[in-house]
Amino acid sequence: MRFEYAPAPESRSLVTLRDSYGLFIGGEFVAGSSVFKTISPATEEVLAEVTHAGPEDVDRAVAAARQAYERVWSAMPGRERGKYLFRIARVLQERSRELAVLETMDNGKPIRESRDVDVPLAAAHFFYHAGWADKLSYAGFGPSPRPLGVVGQVIPWNFPLLMLAWKVAPALACGNTVVLKPAETTPLTALLFAEICQQADLPPGVVNIVTGDGATGQAVVAHPGIDKVAFTGSTAVGKEIARACAVSGKRLTLELGGKAANVVFDDAPADQAVEGIVNGIFFNQGHVCCAGSRLLVQESIADELLDALKRRMASLRLGDPMDKNTDIGAINSRAQLDKIQELTSSGETEGADRWSAPCALPDRGFWFPPTVFTGVSPTHRIAREEIFGPVLSVLTFRTPAEAVEKANNTPYGLSAGVWTEKGSLILWMASRLRAGVVWANTFNRFDPSSPFGGYKESGFGREGGRHGLEAYLDVLGGGDV
Ligand code: TAP
């Protein structure tokens, strides 16, 4: 039975959009070399004009960060830095509805997700790292770990505010200052975050935000005044950055792509597994680095499980991301939609069977229905390449050993899921899966105290937890933090 829901739109009036936004450098919004427009992917309406930072603007931002590092932030006792982080965390909570609405407008993700996942987790990251700021000497990195200096951070568009929090909170807690570049298609919550830094009286220059495109990211990464680079994005760009940093001696952490296996055994609780599969691949339109984009299902239950999955997919509601009942929002950009369409066409051409949930797509904006491919072979592109959209590729296996072999048959290694009632099988699988995170009987769960990161082409370094602090500390140096 299909339920009809009355519209339940969240109010756009919670957000006051400016016509244009400057760069956030030295605690102020300043003009830059040129401007570009950011649009709503759900309606293609222009939301605001944003400044494009050229190399000279990046230079100013790095200089402001250096000055703040040397004069204020690195010398400030950890307990004082912690107070600023607590303040930012509280303001994020106070302004959470505004942030959620703005995120949904600029990114296209359902308001339910920005409200219940992105913004609360972003605040949690600041609370968590605020607690670490005065305890770094007890974190197991020696008695006096030192900050690294000015950190250049480049983030993607899939979780704009949350990725900012993953980057900025540990960097600041450890005594570094930052120059952050948000993605070209989703700069608005980072700019609202800049206002929050002002509201929290963060010393000028501790956080600098330079909006722009890939060239701006390149300028940040290549700047000689940057001591450490932290990048989240595609594996292709990550490799370019690794090459650029290799010759410079800069410290580097990379959080890159994934092609996670979600492995369902025949004794798994079926309804729970179906919810986990749906959450694993359709959460955030599948724009998730750790998405469970390859379903590995034990052959004996494959037909039954797929029937249940299709029934569940048919009940997903696609449409206005501002509606509180929406499950599937808009694809973030025309370019991403083109990429999803190209890869799904290759799935059909290579011989897999495509099934999409029956749902009407809105006339304007960028949309793609939840889709599942069966009859997939490990050599198909849809089984190997990251689609980064609401598309699931299904493969089958007979034995646990075959499941492990197929799950690990990927250049990536970010995450995996295991569904079974047997605890021993969970542990057996977890010790063999080459993935940074292995979820058992759940998927896409995050917590700031739990380190996240990849193996192989999914990158190196960890974000979150005690392990994540290490990326922002000179653990071999002396002195007080
Ligand atoms: P990318 O195209 O790699 O872009 C990421 C960021 O890098 C954007 O801000 C981008 O700017 C900038 N950039 C582009 N070219 C650059 C260059 N040559 N030098 C420096 N910066 C450059 O990735 P995306 O399409 O935005 O994001 C999707 C990818 O991110 C997926 O592969 C996904 O798996 C990965 N991701 C990984 C994680 C973790 S934790 N592993 C989390 C989220 C996403 P523009 O936006 O202006 O192009």
Image (spheres, rainbow, N blue to C red):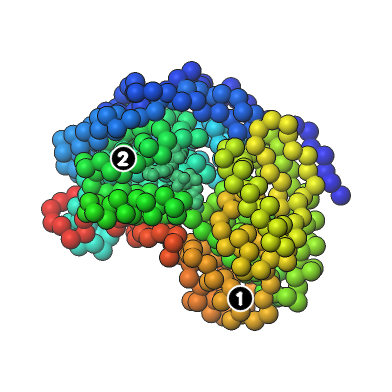
Residue 220's disc is: 2
Question: What kind of element bears circle 1?
Answer: helix
Q: Which residue is mark 1?
A: 403
Residue at the spot 62% in from the left edge and 69% down from the top edge = 378
The percent coordinates of residue 223 (x first, y second) are 25, 41
Q: CA distance from mark 2 to mark 1?
A: 42 Å
Within 8 Å of ligand 1, the CB of disc 2?
A: yes
Q: Residue 102 at what x, y percent from top left? A: 53, 31
Mark 2 against mark 1, which lies toward the viewer?
A: 2
Q: Is residue 115 visible?
A: no
Q: Residue furthest front?
A: 349
Q: Amino acid at mark 1?
A: Ala
- Give left or right: position of 222 versus 37: left
Q: Residues within 10 Å of mark 1 (few under 14, many from 20)?
A: many
Q: Which residue is located at x 44 percent, y 29 percent?
A: 192
Q: Residue furthest top?
A: 19
- In this rendering, would 406 be left or right of 256? right
Q: Earlier in the sequence, mark 2 or mark 1?
A: 2
Q: How many marks?
A: 2
Q: Taking 198 as reference, is 243 above or below it?
A: below
Check disc 2 and report its element: helix, strand or loop: helix
Q: Position of residue 339 (x, y in %)?
A: 59, 47
Q: In the rendered image of this protein, does residue 343 appear above or below residue 32?
A: below
Q: Which residue occupies 56% across, 24% down?
A: 46
**Other-residue count near label 2 (Cα within 10 Å), few / some / many at <14 / 14–19 / ≥20:** many
Q: Amino acid at mark 2?
A: Val
Evaluate whether residue 261 shows in this view: yes
